[in-house]
Image: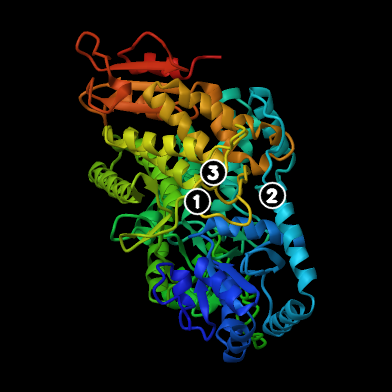
Amino acid sequence: MNRLADATSPYLLQHSDNPVDWWPWGDAAFAEARRRDVPVLISVGYSACHWCHVMAHESFEDPEVGELLNQQVVSIKVDREERPDVDAVYMTATQAMTGQGGWPMTVFATPDGEPFFCGTYYPRPQFVRLVQSVATAWREQRADVERQGAAVVDALSRVGAPPGAGTPLTGELLDAAAADLAAHHDPVNGGFGDAPKFPPHMNLLFLLRQHERTGDGRSLEIVRHTCEQMARGGIYDQLAGGFARYSVDATWTVPHFEKMLYDNALLLRVYTHLWRTDPDGGGLFGRVARQTAGFLLRDLLLPEGGFASALDADTGGVEGATYVWTPAQLREALGEEDGDWAADLFGVTGAGNFGDAREPKRDPGEEGASVLRLARDVDDADPAVQQRWQRVRERLAQARAARPQPARDDKVVAAWNGLALTALAEHLAFTRTIAAGSPDPELAGRLERLVGVVGRAAELLERHIVAGRLRRVSRDGVVGEPAGVLDDYGCVAEAFCAVHQLTGEGRWLPLAGQLLDTALARFARPDGDGYYDTADDAERLVSRPADPTDNATPSGLSALAGALTSYAALTGETSYREAADAALATVAPLLRRHARFTGYACAVGEALLSGPYEIAVVTGDPVADPLVATARRLAPPGAVVVAGEPDQPGVPLLAGRPRLDGAATAYVCRGFVCDRPVTAAAELAARLRPAP
């Protein structure tokens, strides 16, 4: 019997009609394997995964394969986004046994969960032979299989050890990390390394902050170059905004089309901060920031207030079908003249730059399909060109909307929603500063409505806190059972700090403190050397994951350090600052040689090194006051900014800070040491960006 029909995960529900007798992860599945005396198949994936769909179609939907699995194993299906702890344990085993990893992940384990064979995607013939071989080995070579599983578990217990003796994170270490990134920068296409290329958002955020601290022009140029190349490439949706998961080539041209919430949240932070460095002349970066925020709010925002996890890579089983164009399709949508103009602008040719490997070869003379990329500069073009481009984009977007659309994974992941709220709060806080000078009279009103959207999303995350503990996922407003892991606590606490700064409401800061106190008490290693990714009272797996490196998202440790830093600055409670310093000290040994995998840790380190600045503006107009605008435009890396009337409940940064002579007043502190308050925007600017 297939037991996935009652699952909340869209990925599990996609498999609820398979002829495989799937079990969800849980004790009952392993008990069934022990009762039957058979091994366990642990199949891990996620709903937007292209090759997960391929393997499902080839194998899991096949009645013969289903019968084989039902006879020989107990099959468990896991959504990696819902259970990142399970994914982390078995991905570490897969990488150790095969030298690589990815999804779908295919693991065979003993009834105690000890993995003895690991892999990823298998075509149907190979998968059938593999299941048969595993079943034979289980019957005839049981002792060898169990020894292998025990050896893997023993190795896993050593993988989670701290990376080395902790050391204070210094400016010299951060500069060395920036130099390491510069050494791997692709000077032609931007980014780091070769294909496939993933948007290096956390590294870019770090380099922006390192530039602000040191004035290092090389760091800023790497960020600008990479962000421009990505924004002009096919990895960026040239019609509707938003970034795909990665590019299969080195030039950012052909993406793997899934769009993930976490990528777009982190990239929104980068493009907003880059725009902030040149608010008047940063046309491309400001446009991409606005469009990426628009993508999150239009395509991923859910009725219950949170943000969906992802859009699928496939449409109707074909990757990229929604997004690619031929010259003839452009002419059909736009007419001859505009169609040819768009083909030139977006690099669409008869040869094409994209092809799904499962599609039949084209007939001679048949046009190929292309991913749209920006082959010409439009952001600095003549106004008439920009207007034509805007009309073309809108008409193509309307035509594309009539095509079949990719599926959306509408579960709400706490950590990723935390990243999205932090990014949107920062984006809205900065965008507010330029609304007064905008020719659009309705911009200020729209921004205030979006502040309300952020508030409602934060309220949904508040409902994820059940009996004082954070839950990982919800769907349709119903909070699921999986417990939050460390990055959930860190990212959501950071988001509450960001919403507190955006709205000036006192309700959010105590919630952040509650989550941080729980994380410090439940996730810390007993020896004080860092943190585990699961709580001390969480479900016991064959090993307790503890990965300090930043990968697709910030590590739990880095996310926690970021939240601790912001919370300490907002409350003045130094113990949280000390905890952030100690957390980053455990990963400092990795910085010199592995900067690409410590980007968020480095970004948080820059905030700590700069103070961080604590900026309080006492004013009756926390949106449009010139002091507020100056603070939000010029705030140094990781600074916190709060504006409002003095002594508001739940807003420690405004406590005991009166107006000077009845005027709006800015108070600037750094590392809990304060300067003389100022009332003029020019004086505040000099405090925040002193002359060299």
Q: Mark 2 belongs to which amino acid?
A: Ser
149 or 105, nearer to the observer: 149
167 or 637, nearer to the observer: 167
Residues marked 1 and 2 touching at CB (< 8 Å): no
Which residue is tagged 1?
Answer: 538
Q: Is residue 440 above or below residue 397?
A: above
Taking the spot 23% from the left edge, 13% from the top edge, the residue there is: 659
Could you tell whether 238 is left or right of 158 in the image? left
Q: Alpha carbon of mark 1 to alpha carbon of mark 2: how far?
A: 17 Å
Taking the spot 54% from the left edge, 56% from the top edge, the residue there is: 84
Spot the residue most to the front: 35
Which residue is tagged 3?
Answer: 556
- The answer to which of marks 1 and 3 sits earlier in the sequence is 1
Crowd band around label 3 with a 10 angstrom C-alpha radius: few (<14), some (14–19), many (20+) = many
Label 1 residue SS:
loop
- Residue 157 shows which numbered tag? 2
